[in-house]
Image: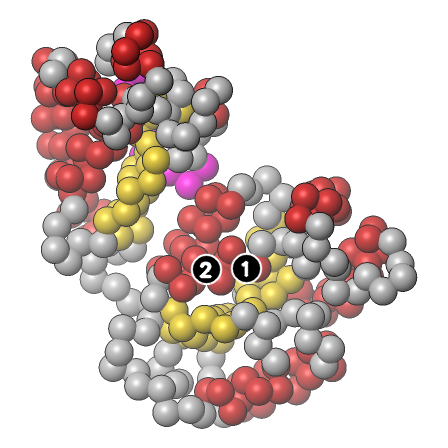
Amino acid sequence: MKKLKIVIITGLSGSGKSIALAAFEDAGFYCVDNMPVQLLPKFLELPLKTDTDIKGLSFVMDLREKGFLTGYPGVFEELRQKGYRFDIIFLEAEQAVLIKRYSQTRRTHPLAQDRPLIDSIREEKRLLEPLRAIASTIIDTSEYNVHDLKSTIFKIAQQSVVTTVMRVEIISFGFKHGNPREADMVMDVRFLDNPFFIPPLQALDGRDGHVRDFVLSNPVSQEFLGKFFELIDFLMPLYEKEGKAYLTIAVGCTGGRHRSVVMADALYTHISRPGRPTYLTHRDVDLKS
């Protein structure tokens, strides 16, 4: 397994470690949550075939395991002595954010016992400070939503492995709900006629055939798509030549329910092909306000 990339995800409880692990899984990593640190050396000795589609190994390790704090220094040093190379990603968030997340999920902090939540958070931060000091990457997730964090971690995962094909993610969104922070390129399609002001179409969204026909029947839409596709076709080989592993293209309208959805669908159809990892997300399509 020494040829596989090894990533250890750790950090404060409530900072998004489960989301980070899911992102690594989406990137093709073999993932294990709450991995006992003492079992890690034995796990790495298992005869896992390296000629499969597995891009690497990712493990979440934290204070849920009672022996983690005392065990990780010796285990990590043992692995380094054996020639293993691994990255440590440490996730954290502001105290107020962690308290809010715990109140929303109603989960119990691993250090809760009989102490208040705020004391548990402070104690965990203190206990994990030595581990934070040796982390390869530290990410403050305070201002990240689920999609932002997953996209950010996915990019890190992609940079961790050698890939010859750039992955493309297309996102439709509404400007009124905020720009996608992970976007490499943002295209504003608010200049197109808005189906929202057509009473029979208002309650529908861009996935509906009637809305799609309305948007695409506009000659301006067709001219725009031709020029937009030409730009994308020009840029993508240049990005790949540069070594870019992941490209996020965001298409936005006012609410993210009509025009941007139709245009994002059209771009996805144009870009996706066999061998091209292409993903489509309609971020705000189900939001009503």
Q: Residue at x 79, y 65 (%)?
A: 111
* Circle 2 residue: 22
Which quarter of the figure has residue 90?
bottom right
Is residue 185 rendered to the left or right of residue 137? left
Q: Residue at x 37, y 25 (%)?
A: 256
Depicted 173 relative to depicted 116: above or below? above
In the rendered image, the quadrant that contains the N terminus is: bottom left
Mark 1 residue type: Ser
Depicted 133 relative to depicted 233: above or below? below
Which quarter of the figure has residue 263?
top left
Q: Residue at x 83, y 51 (%)?
A: 118
Mark 2 residue type: Ala
Depicted 158 relative to depicted 8: above or below? above
Q: Is residue 94 magenta?
A: no
Magenta-colored segment: predominant secondary structure:
loop
Q: Residue at x 35, y 24 (%)?
A: 257
Depth check, front residue: 170 or 281: 281
Residue 221 in the image: x percent, y percent?
A: 15, 18
Depth check, front residue: 63 or 6: 63
Do residues under tags 2 and 1 come within 8 Å of each other at their CB atoms?
yes
Q: Residue furthest right?
A: 114
Residue 273 in the image: x percent, y percent?
A: 12, 50
Span of residues in magenta: 181-190
Residue 25 in the image: x percent, y percent?
A: 40, 64
Which quarter of the figure has residue 81?
bottom right
Question: Residues under labels 2 and 1: Cα distance?
Answer: 6 Å
Is residue 220 rendered to the left or right of residue 47? left
Q: Is residue 184 magenta?
A: yes
* Circle 1 residue: 18
Depth check, front residue: 83 or 120: 120
